[in-house]
């Protein structure tokens, strides 16, 4: 049966992933631009570990979504907006898995070892060294900026629902709001 609201686990995962990605992108841009040194190394390690955390949360989120479903879109939306909402949600789910997997695979090939916060060694067995790693990482960067672009449209849509259409779309994703 289609649920009438998002569960608190779904809301937690939505906002946790959003916050981590909002942190990851500026860290990524800084780490690739500040030049070599101790700070750059630390930012790379932070980016990789937080990125892997996003991957774990994204997989958990997709499992919860598959098991529980999600409330239908609000009533009265034109067909193109329904299609845009469904397509962009699918794209977001795909990209929050694809982007970290590409980062993980590229780093494993070029610059092993990959260790999650220095605690857990999770290097993938990918051969080919620097040339393969660099190629995978260049796709990682393009996919990451595509994710940023889709997120910006997604935020615009959420604000449009809230302030222009004045419907419950944003409210029902906020913590503490239950069945409408
Ligand atoms: C959702 C998760 C992730 C997001 C949103 C993300 C985002 C980004 C962005 C925007 C850049 C480009 C920075 C720039 O060129 O200015 C970047 C670069 C990079 N990311 Fe990620 N990343 C994620 C996960 C990961 C993971 C899991 C790893 C590795 C375990 C990783 C490794 C790297 C590396 C090594 C670079 C530098 C690539 C280069 O030198 O051109 N990323 N990331
Ligand atoms: C990296 C950041 C974000 C990602 C990856 C993301 C991803 C998603 C995904 C995949 C869904 C679909 C949920 C489902 O059907 O199971 C969703 C729903 C939603 N998101 Fe985000 N989101 C992000 C940030 C934001 C932000 C900043 C806002 C608010 C300004 C927001 C507002 C919403 C709302 C209101 C919904 C519910 C839509 C509905 O019920 O029809 N999201 N988000």
Image: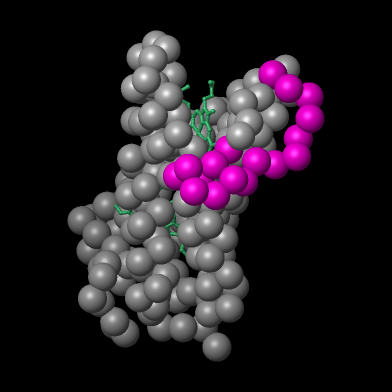
Closest to the observer, 32 or 67: 32
| Residue 174 coordinates in the image, percent (x, y) | 27, 67
Relative to 148, say whether 172 is above or below: below
Quadrant in which the C terminus appears: bottom left
* Residue that sits furthest to the front in the current view: 119
Quadrant in which the N terminus appears: bottom right
Residue visible at 23% across and 76% down? 176
Relative to 75, say whether 52 is above or below: above
Quarter-of-image position of residue 143: top right
| Residue 146 coordinates in the image, percent (x, y) | 51, 35
* Residue that sits furthest to the top in the current view: 35
| Residue 46 coordinates in the image, percent (x, y) | 41, 37
Residue visible at 26% across and 70% down? 175
Predominant SS of the magenta segment: loop
Relative to 72, say whether 100 is above or below: above
| Residue 8 coordinates in the image, percent (x, y) | 35, 75
Relative to 27, say whether 165 is above or below: below
Quarter-of-image position of residue 171: bottom left
Query: Which stretch appears magenta?
Result: 114-130
Closest to the observer, 74 or 45: 45
């Amino acid at each position: 049966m289609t649920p009438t609201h998002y569960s608190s686990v779904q809301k937690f995962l939505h906002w946790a992933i959003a916050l981590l990605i909002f942190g990851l992108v500026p860290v990524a841009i800084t780490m690739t631009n500040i030049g070599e040194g101790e700070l750059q190394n630390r930012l790379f390690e932070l980016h990789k570990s937080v990125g892997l955390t996003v991957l774990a949360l994204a997989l958990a989120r997709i499992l919860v979504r598959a098991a529980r479903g999600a409330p239908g879109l609000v009533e009265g939306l034109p067909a193109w907006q329904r299609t845009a909402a469904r397509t962009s949600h699918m794209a977001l789910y795909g990209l929050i898995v694809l982007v970290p997997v590409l980062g993980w695979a590229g780093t494993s090939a070029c610059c092993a070892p990959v260790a999650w916060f220095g605690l857990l060694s999770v290097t993938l067995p990918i051969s080919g060294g620097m040339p393969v790693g660099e190629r995978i990482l260049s796709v990682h960067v393009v996919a990451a900026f595509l994710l940023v672009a889709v997120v910006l449209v997604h935020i615009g849509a959420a604000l449009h629902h809230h302030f222009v259409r004045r419907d419950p779309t944003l409210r029902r994703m906020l913590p503490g709001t239950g069945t409408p």
